[in-house]
Amino acid sequence: MKENRYTLIKRDGRARRGRLDTVHGTVETPVFMNVGTVGAIKGGVSTEDLKEIGCQIQLSNTYHLHVRTGDELIKKLGGLHRFMVWDRPILTDSGGFQVFSLASLRKIKEEGVTFASHIDGHRIFMGPEESMRIQSNLGSTIAMAFDECPDARSERDYVLSSVQRTERWLKRCKEELDRLNSLPDTINKEQMLFGINQGAVFDDIRIEDADLITDMDLDGYAIGGLAVGETHEEMYHILDVTIPHLPQDKPIYLMGVGTPVNIVEAVYRGVDFFDCVYPSRNARHGQLYTHQGKFNIKNAKYAEDMSPIEEGCGCPACRSYSKAYIRHLIKAEEMLGLRLCVLHNLWFYNHLMEEIREAIDEDRFASFRDEIISAYSECP
Amino acid sequence: MKENRYTLIKRDGRARRGRLDTVHGTVETPVFMNVGTVGAIKGGVSTEDLKEIGCQIQLSNTYHLHVRTGDELIKKLGGLHRFMVWDRPILTDSGGFQVFSLASLRKIKEEGVTFASHIDGHRIFMGPEESMRIQSNLGSTIAMAFDECPDARSERDYVLSSVQRTERWLKRCKEELDRLNSLPDTINKEQMLFGINQGAVFDDIRIEDADLITDMDLDGYAIGGLAVGETHEEMYHILDVTIPHLPQDKPIYLMGVGTPVNIVEAVYRGVDFFDCVYPSRNARHGQLYTHQGKFNIKNAKYAEDMSPIEEGCGCPACRSYSKAYIRHLIKAEEMLGLRLCVLHNLWFYNHLMEEIREAIDEDRFASFRDEIISAYSECP
């Protein structure tokens, strides 16, 4: 049995305060992973910016880096950490989600998936072994298992057979990553593997799968296939029934989630890791997060507002600039406007997690959760 | 006679080392003004970035700020310095160049120009008084006179009548700005006025105009209507014949110029101020400046090049990132790539000026000029 790098520090109800020690440093959980799709955060955000806004860990996309520039070249150049100039942890996704959502002409077989690159249409095959090799080439801190993410509204029969195939793929992922980690020229020989629980909105499929993958003694466990079309209530219900069947001494990651309310609700149910494109994607549309809810900076009422996005916020946008100026930049489609909005939103998310950790440390997470839910009660 | 804020510190041949003291601080010349069209530098460059890359003075566009957000609102919010959060000097152009190049349906009369906004097509009138009022509302450090910039290939008769009208406009600009500077609610009551010499490539028109505007005792003098279609040799010739007819105790500004070679050639002929969109525009196309000439980062040969854009460069891009990574970002159209390229190119331009100033201080400008000309001899 390998070393468990996760430490559960304390609980406040079901909410967990933990710590994941990695070869690239320690991650304090609950944590938000900042999404850098092709090896950079959208909005012109640099390594220095990320450290300033409190980013502990980045998420990079295996599919995007494989089809553009290429994982073999990145390995040759010393791996993704060196390439991106980021010395803290990186989690790479498996590529599966993009293969199933972005690529065209895909064909799923037991071996893996054949698909056409969204860049130039050339045919690519990716299965569990290929995904592990790509992620090993990138040398990320945490590799994600290669899975299929069935639509939340899929038929039960399809979901069951998909989950069973994903379970077989997970075994192959583990074997392949163990092999890769033992090779002399592997960049990160301590690369961790997180398995992914699937099962759409079917409690029994989720539970059975959680029990099965728990037995595989992985470094961490993700819950995938949520926030893809089901209601928030269905999502919270799946967390309620699934998390008790995942090992409590390992980190739990809810993939692709979510709004501030989704995050406090999931932390409340025991989730440790999050990632989501909302802070950067919403910034592009002028949607800004605050502790009083979110608002759109393009609204005419901010045209003469010389106050910062949020009073008391220490982000690079709020430290210097007014709503009126940022609104002017966004309306004029000036890149600085987007950049300031992205920096604010990422600061908000990273600091929301810090506030969550403090609230758990101080046994007041329930009331903190209520505050966030109340602030966002009128937001979509 | 009003106070002269320019000090000529020393000469090295015709090259001048000077200093312009303004209400927003001192500008060491020769200087490059960083172009922030709509109140921000293209490429997501913030005030902090500008200070880091050595920007002494920004140029903002009167036309763009008038048609978008509006100078009256900016005045109400405390002026452009407060709006943009920039406490160093700002030069605003007159709006004339954009009126004549961007706007459609324009009609020139003695009073001024009627044109249609490029944003929404609404009809706007701008003459000398309107330009001064807009620039006074913005509260820039230096206002530029409202001029017509005739095409370099215009007929002599047209150029002569255009220059004479621009001279009449200049008198009106001066009277209006004097009036505005005396009003109690003017933001910058010490706003300076630079006149603009025109005359296309006709020596005698340029010289006669230079003599006439010299007599008007302005705060500075610009040479406009160059780098708009004539050859480099014609441009240098116009500088050779015109600059001796401009006052030697005032700053001289060559508008919209240019390449590193253009800049050393113009400094050699006595120019103090420059502005140009090349560093940011070329960055968008992956064209990067170095002391060994310029190159395109998209070239395949940089795909595996882990060295910085220029060895020894202290810019935020070169300090951390490799050519291989920046090339990857530019190819993937990631905003961080553009931002790093813009920061590098602006650093290069601002530091080129610093090197020029040092060379003049040390009486070795002629050899520095030769180095730059030689490095760029094979560049277009």
Image: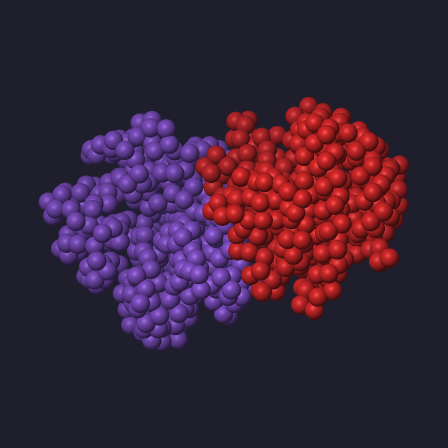
Chain colours: A purple, B red
Please name whichever residue, B172 or B261, is drawn nearer the observer in this view of the structure. B172
Residue A71 screen position, x and y as percent? 42, 35
In the image, residue B309 lies at what x, y percent? 61, 36
Residue projecting furthest to the top? B378
Q: Is residue A27 visible?
A: no
Hey, which quadrant is residue B206 in on the image?
top right
In the picture, measured across the screen, residue B314 lies left or right of residue B27, that is left
Q: Is residue B365 above or below residue B131?
A: above
Q: Taking B182 as reference, is A36 above or below it?
A: above
Task: State which quarter of the image contains the N terminus of chain B.
Answer: bottom right
Residue B306 lies, with reference to residue B29, above or below; the image says above
Q: Give the side of residue A274 with respect to residue B237, left or right.
A: left
Could you tell me which residue is drawn at 53 percent across and 39 percent down?
A: B104
Considering the image in quadrants, where does the C terminus of chain B appear? top right
Number of numbered discs: 0
Q: A107 left or right of B32? A: left
Residue B13 visible, this orientation: yes
User: Picture quarter containing residue A358?
Assistant: bottom left
In the picture provided, is B278 more to the left or to the right than B333?
Answer: right
Identify the residue at the far front of this view. Answer: B110
Give the image location of residue A253, x and y in percent.
Answer: 32, 55
Q: Residue at x 65, y 56 (%)?
A: B133
- Of the pair A45 and B231, the residue shown nearer to us: B231
Residue lying furthest left in this view?
A157
Q: Residue, x 33% and y 31% (percent of image)?
A: A117
| Residue at the image position 32 percent from the left and 52 percent from the top | A256
Residue A74 x %, y %: 47, 36
